[in-house]
Image (cartoon, grey):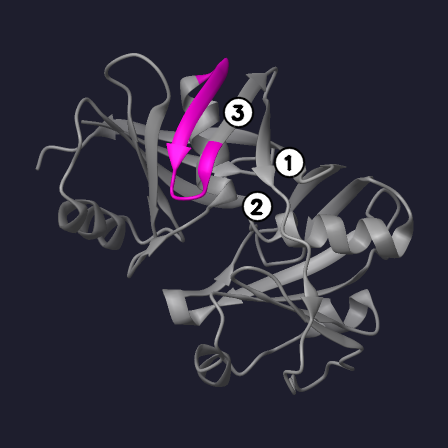
Amino acid sequence: MRLYIVDTFTDTAFAGNPAGVVLLDEPADPAWMQSVAAELKHAETAFVEVGGEGPKSLRWFTPTVEVDLCGHATLATGHVLGGAQVFMTRSGELRTSADAGWVRMDFPSDPPAAAPDEISLPGVTVKEVLRGKWDILVRAADAAEVRGLEPDLGAIAGWDARCVVVTAPGDRPGVDVVSRVFGPAVGVPEDPVTGSAHCMLSPYWSVELGRDELIGEQASARGGVVRMSLQGERVILAGQAVTTVRGELVV
């Protein structure tokens, strides 16, 4: 089976968010896919069935669990396959298109709603707490708080959410939104760049900033940039990608 490692939401190798992509000619055992994802140790590994006609089955695994939606591993898959692709996933039908190093992804919007959660993050002035379908969104006072955050990952792992997304308005030219994403509950202490989180960030900040076209910076150590375009109940996410490894799985 063909295996790729792709750095996503970046045009530079060894930056952005690395994802594994495994091309399958037929369905694979979920336990085997989970073992491969644990072996690769990336935040997510995508498994896509490329045999046959019609939409391609696409699944995503962290090192510990299967997830319902993953943006950066979908971007990596679209980058590897190129052109226009249609995938069937646990989040329904998803589409990608790839051209000149950019991959566009058509994802469902996830507008967050106000939540009663009492959230405490040392060093963060919590201005607002909301919940999307899977994640908690915490609005900080400013981007400096987001960039300087040193969270208690043990505490966050106990919160009832896939991930915690901490965000604030952008603080640099060309950046509208800054965020960081923590998912210790699903085996990802800090995700370098999280496409699916921007399905929630896009509708939230589009209302706050009064614009549907936004640029997001995920301020992790590796960092990355996500273009967001809110289109009704859908979000078009776009990012660049660089393939760093091509190889074969032999087991």
Toward the right, the furthest residue is 210
Q: Which residue is mark 2?
A: 195
Looking at this view, is 93 or 237 the one in front?
93
Q: Which residue is painted at 47% across and 25% down in the image?
A: 78
Q: Residues within 10 Å of mark 1 (few under 14, many from 20)?
A: many
Q: Are marks 2 and 1 in contact (CB under 8 Å)?
A: yes
Height in image: 138 above or below 181?
A: below
Question: Secondary structure under badge 1?
Answer: strand
Name above or below for residue 245 compared with residue 44.
Answer: above
What amino acid is at disc 2? Gly
Left or right of 225, for residue 28: left
Q: Quadrant of the C terminus?
A: top left
Q: Which labelled disc corresponds to residue 96?
A: 3
Q: Main secondary structure of the magenta part?
A: strand
Label 2 to label 1, Cα distance in Å?
7 Å
Question: In the image, residue 13 lies at what x, y percent?
Answer: 51, 36
Residue indicated by mark 1 = 237
- 174 to the left or right of 134: right
Helix, strand, or loop for circle 3?
strand
Label 3, residues with CA under 10 Å away: few <14, some 14-19, many ≥20: many
> Which residue range is magenta in the image?
82-93
Q: Position of residue 1 (x, y in %)?
A: 18, 27
Density class for disc 2 (Cα within 10 Å; few <14, some 14-19, many ≥20) is many
Three-letter amino acid code of the residue under disc 3:
Thr
